[in-house]
Structures are given as C-alpha cells and as structure tokens.
Amino acid sequence: MKVKPAKKKNRVMVELGRTDPALLAEGGDDRNFTLKHILVPVDFSQCSLKALRYAVAFARQFKASLTLLYVVQPYYLPGDFASGLDYAALEKEIEENSARELESIAVKNIGKKAPWKVLLRMGRPVDQISQIADELNVDLIILSTHGHTGLKHVVLGSTAENVVRHAPCPVLTVRVNEHEFLRA
C-alpha cells in the first residue's frame, strides 16, 4: 500500500498493490477500501498536532469521523513524598484541564471539516488506545512518534511502537522529521 498526495489540496491517495489481497475485494476492485472511523491519540505536543493534520485530511477524503483521545497517566509518589496530597482533587483538576484543552484543539484544528468527538481516559496510554480502538471499532489509528532513540527510548519506551504491536486495526505513525506528503 502506498499513500501519496492527491491532486486536490488537503487530500491523499491510497494505492493498493497486488500484494494487498486483504484490502481488495474479489475481482481486484479497490473501491471497497473505506475508512469510517479514525482514532487520533493526542498528547498536546506539536508532534501529535501534526498527526491530527494527517487525520483530518484522511477524514475529509474518506468522509470519516474522528475521535481524539487523551490518556491521563496517573502518577503516584511513594511514601513520605505523597503525604498531604489529595490525589482525587489532583486527578480531577488534571481531567478538567485536559478535557478543555482537548476540546479546544478539536475546535481549532478540525472545526467543521469532519465529524469529531473527544475522549479522555485514565490509565496506561498503550492499553487505553488499543482498548478504545477495539471498543469503537476504529478503522485506523493515526498517531505521532517523537522519535526518541538511545537511552531516552529505553527509559521512556515508545507508545507508538507498542500501539503498532497491540492495536486491533492498522496504525499510521507520523514522525516529527519526515518527508511531507501533506501540504499545509
């Protein structure tokens, strides 16, 4: 499968090769290739906003809906460091701020270009992304990869890499520094 820019602005073309039999209908007709629902995990970074731009282009081309997902990963401090902290109040404040930010990003970057909704979940991002994709019967996940290498990759891990491994559907990863096929 190849994805490349289409002649119309903000559109992409997906070319299927003969080696993509699962995506082809009987008789070699690729008109059955449709995307109805795209999941876009967002972490409020510029990198994830770049992935959102790609998702909006796909949604417009295929008349698909978008779901933006932000996963709040709970952090708990051990022992003495945690005394006096009201975790419930802290989590509630993080959720409220994140929900407002997510809604703002959707309005600003998607607007009326495609149908959309936002979701906020608590937990481990990889688990939540895969679970939501499965629950919502998502056709495609489009997410960013920060491109960490070396020690940073070992310490932080790669959410994108693990989503690719565990997702119940295809995943398109968008890197920070790459050859652009989507024009602004």
Image (cartoon, helix red, strand yellow):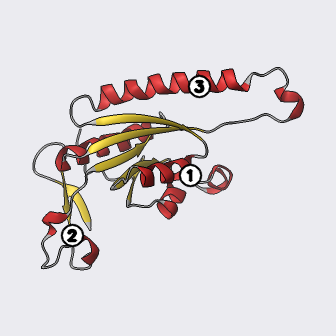
State the image coordinates of residue 150 (x, y, percent, origin top left).
Answer: 63, 56
Task: Tell me which amino acid carries mark 3.
Answer: Ile
Secondary element type, mark 1:
helix
The x and y percentages for residue 142 are 38, 50
User: Given the image, on which type of amino acid does mark 2 rest?
Assistant: Leu
Q: Earlier in the sequence, mark 2 or mark 1?
A: 2
Question: Disc 2 vs disc 3: Cβ atoms closer than 8 Å?
Answer: no
**Which quadrant of the figure contains the N terminus?**
bottom left
Residues marked 2 and 1 touching at CB (< 8 Å): no
| Alpha carbons under labels 3 and 1: distance apart | 20 Å
> Which residue carries the number 2 mark?
16
Tag nearer the camera, 2 or 3: 3
Determine whether 91 is above or below 160 in the image.
Answer: above
From the top left corner, tell me how far across and down residue 43 is, in percent. Answer: 49, 37
Return the disc, 2 or 3, that comes first in the chain's sequence. Answer: 2
Disc 2 on helix, strand or loop?
loop
- Which residue bears the numbered disc 1? 127
